[in-house]
Each structure stands twice: as C-alpha cells, then as structure tokens.
Image (cartoon, helix red, strand yellow):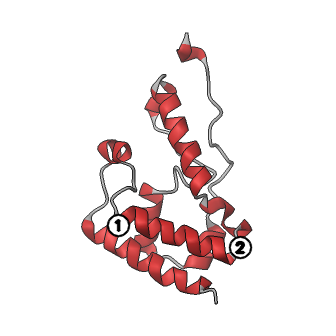
Amino acid sequence: MIQFYRLEKNNAVYRDVAAFEADTKPNKEIIAILENNCYDCHSNKTDYPWYAEVAPISFWLNGHVKDGNKHFNVSQWATYKDKKKDHKLEELIEEVEEGEMPLKPYTLIHGNITKEQKEALISWAKKARGNYHLE
C-alpha cells in the first residue's frame, strides 16, 4: 500500500546554481565535485535515481533531500545575506573536514570523494569565504 503513495519531489524545471557559482567562482574541478556530490540535496533540482520510486527508500531519500535543502540550498544563494553566505561556506568546510558530507549512505551508493577532492573543495570554500569578510 505504501508503494502507491507518491512524495512531492525536489523537481524544479532546472538546477539554478548560477548565482552561487558566479559568487564563489568554482573552477571546473570544483563544479564537477559539487555536481556529483552536493547539488542533488543542496539545490532546487534533484536528479533522482531509479530506486527513488521504491518505498520505503523513497521516503528515506526524500527526507535527506528536504533536510539538505533546509540547511543549505545553493539555488537560494542570491537571497542570502553576506553573513549567511559566509556561514554556509564555513559549515561546508566543517562538514567536509569532519567527513560528515557527503553523507555516508550517499557514498555507499555513489562513491566517496577522494582526499584530494576534499582538500580542493575545502581550499576553494576558504577562498570563497574571502568574498564575505565581515567587519
């Protein structure tokens, strides 16, 4: 019975990351990391895998996407004030450094990012925070 209940998906017409990328200036390597490991849960458009249609996995996955968007949504970047932008990048750095992002269940299915990719992501985010130094 639960299989017939369809959840509302994170399904914008397109993934709007333009303001975020224009502001933070990721290079092609960082964009690839973000696209492959972050944007599905942290933007307004998720590319759902086939198993997202199978309950109860669909409920579990939907919860992760909603939670990810609640904490950090790059599609909403233009609406953030500089203080919030700085804080979100600070959180990104902490989560990646502590191994909390990407989530373990995500990495089990999609693979983890390498040590070098983590270092590149952290370095880029630290540099991007320079745009928002608040006195």
The quarter of the rendered structure image containing the C terminus is: bottom right
Task: Please tell me which residue is depicted at 61% across the width and 58% down the height of the picture.
Answer: 73
Q: Is residue 32 left or right of residue 129?
A: left
Indicate the amino acid at tag 2. Answer: Lys
Task: Please tell me which residue is depicted at 60% across the width and 62% down the height of the picture.
Answer: 74
74 is higher (above) or lower (below) than 27: above
Task: Please tell me which residue is depicted at 54% across the width and 44% down the height of the picture.
Answer: 65
Residue 97 badge: 1
Q: Nearer the viewer, residue 108 or 82?
A: 82
Residue linked to disc 2: 81
- Count of picture labels: 2
Q: Is residue 19 left or right of residue 37?
A: right
How crowded is the residue under tag 2: few (<14 C-alpha within 10 Å), some, or many (20+)?
few
Secondary structure at badge 1 equals helix
How crowded is the residue under tag 1: few (<14 C-alpha within 10 Å), some, or many (20+)?
some
Q: How far from the left and from the top, in percent, is residue 55?
A: 49, 22
29 is higher (above) or lower (below) than 70: below
In three-dimensional space, the C-alpha distance between marks 2 and 1, rounded to whole angstroms, equals 24 Å
